[in-house]
Each structure stands twice: as structure tokens, then as C-alpha cells.
């Protein structure tokens, strides 16, 4: 049998593989430089353009390298068809202009260097993909956050409030956006009002991301709000993975009667945002391990943001548990 098996193997047809492409010795070895920034939030008064740097390894002669456009939202970007290098030049810039970009709208682009201009066997960036939004952020003097989501997953005390770093922006249609940076950061102190300076259930070893953004959007009338799905950037149990959460409506089957939107208190006369309250059943929460299995819980406790100590104190007094 051994002899016959060897004979069978020897008589079988060889499998031929397509040869790997040979890199042209005149290939420019082009790539997008490592220090490029691809995503931008620009002040509305800033120039409506961004610059990307293209580099090359073959600098002996002058060369022009084509730029292929894969994505261009609403054709808002004016993108050059190529980038040119002089002899000896290793880097050259291309400028993406977007003079007609509207304030508050996000626009995406994706570019690729033309075939044959790069070495496919070198680990360099051959694509450039990003987005641009024109937006002006205004910092709140005070922002006090009370979380009602974590208790959906873990048994934690409620309510607990802490100060957060928050800012707001407004758009031409009247809607507003609130951004909270790293809302679940480590706590070190608590003030006389019982308000912490961070989330008291985590420490530095439990934080996985220090660049978290919680984004809340209001409608044009500034009466309702939604919270974008986001990763909290921290865990309470490493085996469970990071906490996640956001607005339940649109994630779960049901209407806003089942999953109410957040309530916004905006003083039009004073042009001041007072609070955003996500009430019972408005938000959901989960952890990475359960979310991967399609499991999440609906938050029964409110999650609130108040933009003055007085507004927070008034709410606490009105909603204090009965003794």
C-alpha cells in the first residue's frame, strides 16, 4: 500500500500558483505619510481645506503619481488628480478643498494611490480615508452627570453624580450637539454636595480608552435628545469587557412610547441649555461580551446632565426618594 500511495502521489498533477507580481525597478514606492491626520473637526471660521502628504522611496527622478478617488460625499471635496515630485524630493502635499461644506454636516473621503506607483510588499499606507465636519464647540462652565446605565448591568449605588468635561455646538437648523469627554474617568475627590470628580467605581487599571466621546444630539426645537451608541472606555469586570450604551430607540424594536427620547430643558430667552434627562427606558446598556451575543438591558434609572449646580440641586430635591 505504501508503494502504491507513493506512486499515486507522484502521478498526480502539480498545482501551479500564479507568480507574485514583480515590482517594477522604476516603481516610486509611494505611500501616504505616517504623520497625516485624516479626521478633522474644524471651526466654521477655519479655512475649508486640509492637506495630506504623499511620500516615496524612489527619489532619483521627477515623477507624477495619480490619485484615485474611492469616496467623496456629495462630491464636496475638490481633489487633485495627481501629485508631483521633483527629482530628489521624497514628500509632496495634496490639498483637499471643500468650500461648499455646510456647518454641522460630516463629509467623508477615501483616496488610493494609482496602481504601479507603490510596492505591494511593503507595509505602508496606500489608502487615505477620513472625514471632515465644520463645528464650533463651546465649553460649559459646569456640567454634572448622573449615570443610570451602569446599574442595568451591575449592582451599583444610584444616584451617583460627578462633574464632567462637556461642550455644546449648534447648527443652522436649530439642533444642538453636546459632547462629553471621558465621562467615566477615575474619581479622586467628592465635594460638599456629594458630587464626585469622576466615576467612583473605576480606577486607572479599569480604563481602556482616554479618548471617549459621549455625543448627545437634540432636535431642531431643542426639546428631545438622543445619545449615540458609544463604548464607555472602561470595564468593571475584565472578563465582561467594556461597558457600552446609548439611546434604546432605533436599536430595539419599538416606538418612542416604548423607548422615550431624552427631554431637553432649553431656555430660549436666556439662550441657555439647562438640562438633558434620559428617563426610564430611554437608554440601554450592556458589556462587550454580552453585546456580541445580542444581549443588553434597558435602563430603568434616569441618566441626567445638568449645566448648573442650582439646576442639579433642584432636580435632586424634587426626586429625592421618599423616607
Image (spheres, rainbow, N blue to C red):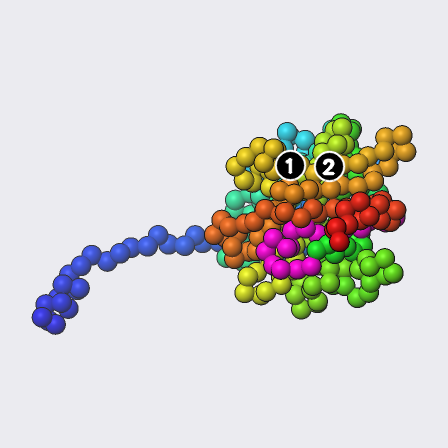
- Determine which residue is flagged by label 2: 263
Nearest the viewer among 186 and 107 is: 186
Q: Decide: few, some or many residues near mark 1? Use Cα within 10 Å; few <14, some 14-19, many ≥20.
A: many
Q: Position of residue 131 (x, y in %)?
A: 67, 41
- Determine which residue is flagged by label 1: 260
Q: Residue extending furthest right?
A: 270
For the record, the magenta segment spans: 139-157
Q: Position of residue 191 (x, y in %)?
A: 86, 61
Q: Could you say which quadrant of the image residue 22 lies in?
A: bottom left
**In this rendering, position of residue 239 left or right of residue 232:** left
- Dominant SS of magenta comes to loop
Against 290, residue 272 (above or below) is above
Question: What residue is drawn where x is 78% and y is 56%?
Answer: 162
* Label at residue 99: none
Q: Position of residue 270 (x, y in %)?
A: 90, 33
The answer to whether any part of residue 59 appears in the image is no
155 in magenta: yes
Nearest the viewer among 61 and 182 is: 182
Q: Residue extending furthest front?
A: 323
Amino acid at each position: 500500500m505504501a508503494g502504491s500511495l507513493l506512486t499515486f502521489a507522484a502521478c498526480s498533477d502539480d498545482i501551479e500558483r500564479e507568480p507574485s507580481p514583480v515590482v517594477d525597478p522604476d516603481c516610486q514606492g509611494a505611500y501616504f505619510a505616517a504623520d497625516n491626520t485624516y479626521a478633522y473637526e474644524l471651526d466654521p471660521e477655519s479655512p475649508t481645506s486640509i492637506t495630506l502628504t504623499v511620500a516615496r522611496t524612489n527619489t532619483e527622478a521627477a515623477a507624477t503619481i495619480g490619485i484615485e478617488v474611492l469616496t467623496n460625499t456629495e462630491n464636496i471635496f475638490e481633489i487633485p488628480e495627481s501629485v508631483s515630485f521633483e527629482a530628489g524630493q521624497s514628500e509632496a502635499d495634496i490639498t483637499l478643498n471643500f468650500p461648499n461644506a455646510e456647518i454641522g454636516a460630516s463629509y467623508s473621503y477615501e483616496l488610493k494611490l494609482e496602481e504601479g506607483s507603490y510596492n505591494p510588499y511593503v507595509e505602508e499606507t496606500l489608502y487615505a480615508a477620513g472625514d471632515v465636519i465644520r463645528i464650533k464647540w463651546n465649553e460649559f462652565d459646569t456640567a454634572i452627570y448622573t449615570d443610570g446605565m451602569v446599574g442595568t448591568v451591575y449592582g451599583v449605588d444610584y444616584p451617583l453624580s460627578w462633574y464632567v468635561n462637556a461642550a455644546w455646538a449648534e447648527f443652522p437648523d436649530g439642533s444642538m450637539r453636546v459632547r462629553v469627554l471621558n465621562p467615566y474617568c477615575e474619581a479622586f475627590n467628592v465635594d460638599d454636595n456629594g458630587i464626585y470628580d469622576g466615576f467612583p467605581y473605576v480606577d486607572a487599571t479599569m480604563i481602556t480608552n482616554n479618548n471617549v466621546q459621549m455625543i448627545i444630539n437634540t432636535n431642531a426645537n431643542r426639546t428631545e435628545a438622543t445619545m449615540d451608541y458609544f463604548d464607555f472606555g472602561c470595564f468593571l469586570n475584565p472578563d465582561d469587557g467594556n461597558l457600552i450604551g446609548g439611546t434604546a430607540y432605533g436599536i430595539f424594536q419599538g416606538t418612542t412610547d416604548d423607548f422615550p427620547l431624552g427631554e431637553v430643558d432649553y431656555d430660549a430667552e436666556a439662550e441657555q441649555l439647562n438640562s438633558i434627562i434620559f428617563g426610564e427606558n430611554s437608554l440601554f446598556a450592556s458589556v462587550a461580551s454580552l453585546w456580541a451575543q445580542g444581549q443588553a438591558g434597558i435602563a430603568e434609572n434616569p441618566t441626567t446632565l445638568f449645566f448648573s449646580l442650582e439646576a442639579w440641586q433642584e432636580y435632586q430635591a424634587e426626586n429625592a426618594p421618599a423616607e
